[in-house]
Image: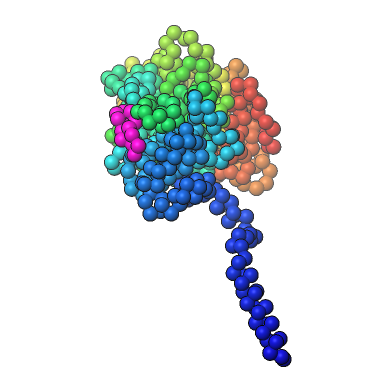
Amino acid sequence: MSPIYHRRLALLGALCLALAACAGPVSTSRVDPKVVLRELDQSAITSGKPSLPTRNVLYEHGLFEAFDDRPAAAIAELHRAMVAARGDQEMLFALAELSFLYGQATKKRDHYLAAAVYAYAFLFPEKAGDPGPGRFDPRLRTAADLYNWALILSFRAANGSEVVPQGGTFELPFGRLEVAFDPAALRAGDRELFGFVPIGELEVHGLAMRYRWPGLGAPLAASTRPIDASKPGRDLVAPRLKVAVTALLRIAEARRALVQGELLTSRLELHLAWDAESVSVAGERVPLELEPTAAIALTFTGMPVMEIETLGFLGRLTGALAERPPLASTTPYKPGLIPVVFVHGTESSVVRWAEMYNRLLADPEIRSRFQFWFFQYDSGNPIVLSSLLLRDSLAKAVARLDPQGKDPALRKMVLIGHSQGGLLVKMQVVNTGDRIWDSVSKKPLDQLDLSDKTRELLRRAMFVEPLPEVARVVFICTPHRGSFVAGRNLIRNLVRALVALPTNLAGADADLVRNRDALQPGVSLVVPSAVDNMSPHHHFIRTLQDIPVASSVMVNSLIAIETDGPVEQGNDGVVEYKSAHIEPVESELIVRPSPHSTQGNPHTIEEVRRILRLHMGLKTGTTPLEVR
C-alpha cells in the first residue's frame, strides 16, 4: 500500500473524528411510555421535584442551577420577574412549586404560605385580565394540590398531628399575609368542632373503596362535642364521629396584590361536608376537596370492636361504652332528608355497615336525599326488649327533631336490618295483637300477678302496632323462621349462662315464678336470650313468622347463600334460604356466593343502593341478575 494511500486514509479518519465531535447532542430514543409519562407527570407533589413547566421557567430566567445552590435567592429573583411581568401565570405556577419545595426542605411556614398564595393567584386571575389556565392544563390539578397541602402545612400544630385554624398576621418571604378567622366557624349546630386531623395523608384499611372528591381546600376530619353538655340539643350526631371538613383560605385579589406589592388579606373558612360541597370563588363554582372514606375510617380507628360486639352481646359493657346512645346519626338533622336506619345483627356492631355506608355516601343523589342513622344495642337481650328499644329510640328522635310534625321526610323512614336486626325491624311494622303474648301465657296480661313496672314493660314490648313513620324495610339474611345455629341446644344453653339480663328486667324472674301456672306448656321460667328467640323451635319466632308486615310498608329482601346446589336448599352458614325467604316482597335478591355477614359484599351494597334510589323515584340502572 502506497504512502499516499496511508496519508489519505489518515486524513479521512481525522475528518470523521472532527465530524463526530461536531455532531449535535439533541436526539431521541424509544423507551417504555411509562418512563416518558413519569417525566411529564412529575411535580413537587408527586415526586418532590419541579415539574417540566417549572423547570422551563427556571431555564428561561437562568435560574436552574441557582435554585439548587441558592433556592431562597432564586425564588426572590423569580418573584421580582413575575411582578415585572404583571403576574405572569407561568411564573406564578413555578413560584408555587418552588416555594412548596423550599418549605419542605426548610420546614418554614412562610414559604408554605407563599406557595398557597402563588397557587391561588395562578388558579384565580380575578380582575387582572389574564384568562387563566385552560381546563385541560395539567397544572390546574397540581396547583390545587399545592394550595391544599400548603394550607395543611401552614396551619399544622407543633406536634404535627393536627391542623389549628387561626387568624393573625403572618410573615411571607416578600411581605405579610393577614388571615381573618371567625371562631364561630368552629360551631356546627349544637356542637363545636375540635381536633382537626389532615386526612388526605392517611392510609385507609378495611374499606375496599376509597372515595375522594377532588377540589380546592385542605381536607380535614374534626371531632365534635356539645357546646353545652347539659343541653344535648336536637341532633343525634354520634359522639365518636369524625366530621369531614374542608379548610379554605380565600385571598382577596391575590394576583393584583402580588403585583402591586400590597398587604395580602385573606379569610380562613371551614366548610362542613354536610353543609356544602362547593363554594363560589372569583365568580365561578368551585368544588371543595373532601375525603369522606378517610373520615369514616378515622371514626372507627381505635374503636374496641371486639369488646363492643362480644361484651355488648353478653350485656356486660362497662364505662363509656355502656353509655353509648342507642341511635346515632352521621349528620345533624336537616329537614327534608329521609332517615335510613341500619340495625346490626347478633354479636355485631355499627362497624359492619361501614363499607355499605361508604358506598352510599359516594352517590350524590342518595346523600342529598337521605340521612343515615345507626341503631346499636346489646344483641343478647330478648328480641322483644331490643325491638322496644328501637321503637322508643325512633319515636323519641322524631319527637325531638320535629316536635311540630312539619317534616314529611321523617315519615318515610327506611329500616335496614341484618340477621337479628331484621327481626327487630319487622317488629316495627307488624300488628301483633295478642298473638305474641298468647304464645307465652294462657291468661291475659291484666290478670297476672306482676309489678306495675313489669306489666307495663311487657305491654309495650309484646303488644305492638306498625310505626307510622316507617315506609320501607329491607331484610338482609333475616332468620324469619329461625336460625339452625340458634337451634342447637349447646349454643342456647351456653349463651343463656353467659348473658347478663338488662336492669329493666330486674325482678322479672320472681314475677315469672309467681305466675308459673299461667305459662303455656313448654315455656321456660327463665327469661330467654335473643339466641333462644331465634331457635326454630321457640314460641317467639314461630309466632312472629306468621304475622305479616303491614300492607302499607314496602318490603325488600336480600338472602346470602354460600352453599352449592339449588337455592331452595341453600344457606349462608347461619340462616337457611327457606327461613330468610318471605312473601310478599317487592324484590328478593340472592347474593351468591356469600356468607352470612354479607353487608360488605358489592352485590349486597349495590342492591341496597338500588332500593334507596327506587324509594326516591330515581333511575336504578339494570335489574340485578338474581332478583326473584
Q: Quadrant of the image for the C terminus?
A: top right
Residue 212: percent from left, percent from top: 51, 37
Give coordinates of residue 360: x percent, y percent: 54, 32
Quadrant in the rendering for residue 363: top right
Residue 616 left/right relative to 531: right
Q: Position of residue 74 (x, y in %)?
A: 40, 47
The question of residue 165 being in magenta is answered with yes
Question: Residue at horizontal 40%, vertical 23%?
Answer: 236
Give the residue displayed 60% in from the left and 22% down from the top: 615
Q: What is the x, y in percent for residue 19?
A: 63, 70
508 relative to 562, above or below:
above
The answer, for residue 177, to whether it is visible in the render is: yes
Q: Please, what is the dominant secondary structure of the magenta stretch?
A: strand
In the rendered structure, the answer to whether residue 510 lies left or right of residue 52 reads left
Decide if residue 370 is on the left or right side of residue 166: right
Query: Does the segment drawn in magenta span residue 113?
Result: no
Viewer-proximal residue, 104 or 428? 104
The magenta segment: 164-178
Rendered residue at 46%/50% (across/down): 62
Front-most of 226 and 514? 226
Q: Residue furthest bottom?
A: 1
Q: Is residue 402 above or below residue 115?
A: above
Residue 219 in sight in this render = no
